[in-house]
Amino acid sequence: SQRTLVLIKPDGVRRGLVGEIVGRIERKADWRITALELRTLDRAVLEQHYAEHVGKPFYEPLVEFMASGPVVALIAEGERVIEGVRALAGPTDPIAAAPGSIRGDFGTVVRENLIHASDSEESAEREVKIFFPGLA
Ligand code: GTP
Ligand code: MG
């Protein structure tokens, strides 16, 4: 079984969608939430988390947004959970995301797309270290 690092982004927390998003993950058969914390991210953590995007045109506004309020960071564990949470989230652009997905149901703006989920086993382990160093 796998684990993945999920962030409910500041728009999701501000809009009261934490229960909705956590619920969709929690209800998948045999998946478990094994860590969960509300916290406001600083630039240093965001620079580590989004290292692959440093220098891109959307990087500064992305960091500004991600630091604009608390996020919910969580670890979900279970069968194919990495691919599975990405599927629940839908594609990066919420307008391109199908209804039924989290981004497709609730998002309109690329930056404010509600959820982050690790995109590979390597990313998951790297991101767990950043957000839950005690569980790495
Ligand atoms: P994350 O799970 O947040 O990493 O999303 P992702 O894997 O679907 O997208 P990616 O890692 O490529 O980009 C990270 C985040 O940067 C996205 O979720 C968006 O919030 C933002 N982003 C990515 N590409 C663009 C873009 O072209 N324009 C803008 N404005 N934001 C972008
Ligand atoms: Mg990504």
Image (cartoon, grey):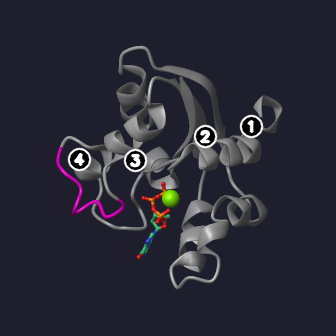
Label 1 close to label 3 by CB (< 8 Å): no
Label 3 close to label 4 by CB (< 8 Å): no
- Work out how far the residue at label 4 is from the one at label 2, CA to CA, in angstroms: 21 Å
Q: Secondary structure at mark 3?
A: loop
Q: Secondary structure at mark 1?
A: loop
In the picture of the structure, the residue carrying the numbered disc 3 is 15
Q: Main secondary structure of the magenta part?
A: loop
Q: Which residues are magenta?
A: 92-99
Q: Residues within 10 Å of mark 1 (few under 14, many from 20)?
A: some
Q: Residue furthest right?
A: 134
In the picture of the structure, the residue carrying the numbered disc 1 is 132
- Work out how far the residue at label 3 is from the one at label 4, CA to CA, in angstroms: 13 Å
Q: Residue 135: x and y, percent?
A: 77, 30
Disc 4 marks a residue whose amino acid type is: Asp
- N-terminal label among 3 and 2: 3
Q: Which mark is residue 110?
A: none
- N-terminal label among 3 and 4: 3
- Work out how far the residue at label 3 is from the one at label 2, CA to CA, in angstroms: 16 Å
Q: Residue 106: x and y, percent?
A: 28, 50
Q: Residues within 10 Å of mark 3 (few under 14, many from 20)?
A: few
In the picture of the structure, the residue carrying the numbered disc 4 is 105
Q: Secondary structure at mark 4?
A: helix
